[in-house]
Image (tube, rainbow, N blue to C red):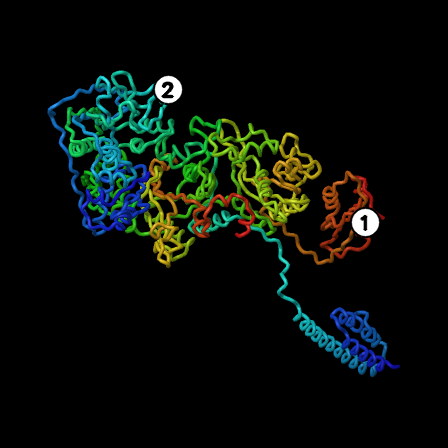
Amino acid sequence: MNILVPHSWIKEFLETSAKPEEIAKYLSLCSQSVEKITKTDNDYIYEIEITTNRSDCLSIYGIARELAVILPRFGIKTKLKKIKLGQIPENPVKNLPLKVKITKSSLCPRFTALIFDNIKIGPSPKIIQKRLKKVGIRALNNVVDISNYLMVELGQPMHTFDYDKVKKATMILREAKQGEKIITLDNQERILPQGTIVIEDGEGKIIDLCGIMGGQNSEVDENTKRVLLFVQTYNPAIIRKTCQLLSFRTEAAQRFEKGVDPEGVIPAIRKAILMFEENCNAKVASKLIDIYPNPPKPKKIILSSEKLNQVLGIPFSLREAGKILKSLGFETKLLKKKLQASPPHWRYEDINIAEDLIEEIARIYGYHLLPSELPSGKIPIKPVNKLLMWEEKIKDMLKYWGFFETVSYSMISKNWLETLKIPPEICLKISNPLSLDLEFMRPTLIPSLLNVIKENENWPEIKIFEISNIYLPQGKNQLPKEISTLSIACDGNSFFNLKGVVENIFKELQIENFNFEQKIPNSLFYSKIFSSSYRAKITVENSNIGFIGEIKTEVLNKFGIAKKVNIVELNLPEVIKFFNPIKKYSPISNYPPIIEDLAFIVNNQTKVGEVIQLIKQISPTIKSVDLIDVYKNTRTFRIVYQSYQKTLTDEEIKRIREKIVEILKKKFKIKLKS
Amino acid sequence: MDNKDKIINLRNQAISKILTSKTKEELENLRIKFLGRKGEITQIIKEIPKLKEKEKAELGRLLNETKKIIEENIQKQKLSIDKSQNSQNNLVDVTLPGKKPPLGHLHLITYTIREITQIFEKLGFTRVRYPEVEWDWYPFEGLNMPQNHPARDEWETFFIENLKNSKYGLGVLTPHTSSGQLREMETTKPPIRMLNIAKCYRRQSDASHAPMFYQFEGLVIDKGISITHLKGTLDYFAKQYFGPQRKTRIRPFHFQFTEPSFEFDVTCIVCQGKGKLPNGQKCKVCKEGWMELGGSGMVHPVVLKNGGIDPGKYTGFAWGWGVERLFMMKYGIDDIRLLFSGDLRFLEQF
């Protein structure tokens, strides 16, 4: 939470020669971060980011208290001044009644109230109005301004009621029932959730949405004569929950949900008395009502010298540590090789363990004074993550084969799922999506790549890929499977270009026993989005590792793509399982190879891949088989024969050739072209 | 014609043909014609054994001489062909574009992740990967942020429908890589030097916040790890990534899962840490010369305990910073959403 702090207001509590830039710099280095300094008429306004643990700094005084410790460490003489406070009369002349009932003490750790008489409503003094304006609060009248002013100055939110509107001078602090209503000061009717802290008056009306905003029915107005000043602390968790459920948060609520110091209540009331007397000509007209059943018990935290030195990384004397803590308001006691410290009441909630003390000591000593060193311990022995390694290698391959890497959101729309014939019910759904475009965790990268192709429709030749997780649910109480997936897309008639890319990736991984099978199970969405001719399931040793195909026109149309698109999607962990780290070495033959081209007449059932596989197995003398020409129903294969023992004779070649022809005829019913 | 004349004729014939030849192929054919295995000179050599002793010696000498002369001429002609070809080459327009092999582009995020990884690998860190869809325990509860803790406000979290574990809570998209801390502690005994680079998700979208983004999380746990080690490690990174002249500093901050907690700053790369540009204007990129890189801190004892590590024996430090923030600073990219748009005109530049 950011607060605005005028330099002139700090000076009311601080005797210092520090310049505004120095204050900003040193406060940032040792305490809270000054995000901005703005210069306005003869003043500087600091915008300070207060971390959630430091509610004690959510005030002008809190910041001054920090500066009084920090600035002297940089050689700037600084002294914290005493706050001027009024007196709470033991026996006021008038003692107006107020009956208070708190149904549950955990709702309100400290409840105080004081009544003022003889109020004359009017504008606040100029200085009050000016200061409120500087911190972004509009001045209203002398009564309401006091509560806002003191919230900013001391960090204690407070509320003022018109005493005469609190019927039967009775307040019952209780939890709201589901559906109860209140019209708050901003003229909004609010329907309250169960458990909201509220105050009911003697006629059963809810007159306050506690800690958040007062009710309109008890508001101070220009006719108000008597004011009930109300200063409390509330259970932070309940205030927070109510704000969340109502989607409504005020500055007071932001402070209460971070915790307000119950010991700060009395000084706030005493300062208020002074201001009521001076600004409103008012008189205290009741005894102080102070319900505070469980004041916090003192905390003792022990810090050992060993721990302190270990975390700081330098030897640090406990005496010096104690001095720093003392300057921050801690009570300290030096024990044998240990320091005992009790936090001041304004840090009570925040300081609990030895590490908390170390933080205080180190930040005031100055983090900048600690040396920088690399850890000197043993370097852990941890095997390389093969998946991560191959992801990077494959990215490089694709880059150097001309592909663009894209990164797109993991979340996609229901519409995209339906276009790809994927039932949304089987996908992981976000219950609070930012928009309907980002509602489901994608079970495939295909729609994202199609979208990139659509978005770049004027690009001449699109070759893109992405490596990202896909998410597959595994039931209500198990995390989904996250599978690192490689998808590559090309536009145009690129089925075999893409297949070649996949084959080359396999070659780099030294995977040999792969197959492209045209049959894709009907249950898979791939079978529904790939054209019936250009499609294949990719397997290695009977494991399914991916799918390749040309996207159907009907699917492309829905994405607004006018050209053809081929996509391959590979399950990377499955692919990598088959990675063969051992390179096969075959000695280089001293005898020349014989190269021969054989043309076969094929029929429409012939699968060239199977033919090549079969020829290779016919003789160890066959070094390689490649398809070199396709013409009508003729397929020409280039066969390389080579022996390690001798120069092959025509007769030996002839025998192998005859065997090839015979086996192909038997197995595939295809003939050698004569 | 006797053998001698035959040889001389052959020699002359050869020389004239060699001198008029224009290509290396032609020359090679001539070499084969005269000196090859079945060449004309070779044929005569084969005849020698049939001759008388006296003639043998004379002819042998002549043949050797002829062979030598032909070879010399072939060499000479070869050089002269080379020379003339070179002078022709001088006329080639070398400004014509070359024939390029295909060249694609990796995403800026990939390059940055690699750069980060390389720097930390030198210090013995190993890259890991943990779930993006996580139980509440790992990014929140186990990191000392119980339900309804105000600190949770900083992480606007996406929840998954119908996903709940009785022990670990609701299913969420992890809003930071710190969820990997407990995962690492569960599987690895100290010493730990973890580098977790991953996608994170938060309900946010503007020029500097995308609902999906990357963070890199470091975790070091060992005996005797101190704030000085945190400073040293992060300072090393900043100098490696942004340049050796960078200065760095840590400032107090607050996270529930570290104690003490810090904000880590590096001197601005635009104004060189001066806070002002050469023209006297205030630098817009930084705050008074410092750029915030992100949060860090000493691992909270509760977190160590939740990870099954004895906080009495071990201490550690951790940081979790935005990957995009690094290169947006470096390249001056001002809209994070451009990164995930798939615009090839953007991707082509890296």
Location of mark 2 (residue): A179
- State which mark lies toward you, 2 or 1: 2
Horizontally, residue B78 falls left or right of residue B58, namely left
Quadrant hosting residue A62 = top left
Q: Position of residue A81 (x, y in %)?
A: 17, 42
Vertical position of residue A205 compared to residue A156: above or below: above
Q: Which amino acid type corresponds to the residue marked 2 in the rendered image? A: Gly
Name the chain letter of the residue that bears numbered label 2.
A
Q: Earlier in the sequence, mark 2 or mark 1?
A: 2
Q: Position of residue A447 (x, y in %)?
A: 58, 38
Quadrant hosting residue A46 = top left
Horizontally, residue A244 falls left or right of residue A260, namely right
> Which label is found at residue A655?
1
> Which label is found at residue A118?
none
Q: Residue at x 87, y 81 (%)?
A: B2
Front-most of residues A620 and A31: A31
The N terminus of chain B: image quadrant: bottom right
Instruction: Classify mark 2: helix, strand or loop.
Output: loop
Horizontally, residue A567 falls left or right of residue A382, namely right
Front-most of residues B193 and A94: A94
Q: Residue at x 62, y 57 (%)?
A: B100
Looking at the image, the residue that sits furthest to the right is: B1
For label 1, the crowd category at 10 Å Cα-Cα, with few meaning under 14, some 14 to 19 and many 20 or more, is few
Q: Which amino acid type corresponds to the residue marked 1 in the rendered image? A: Arg
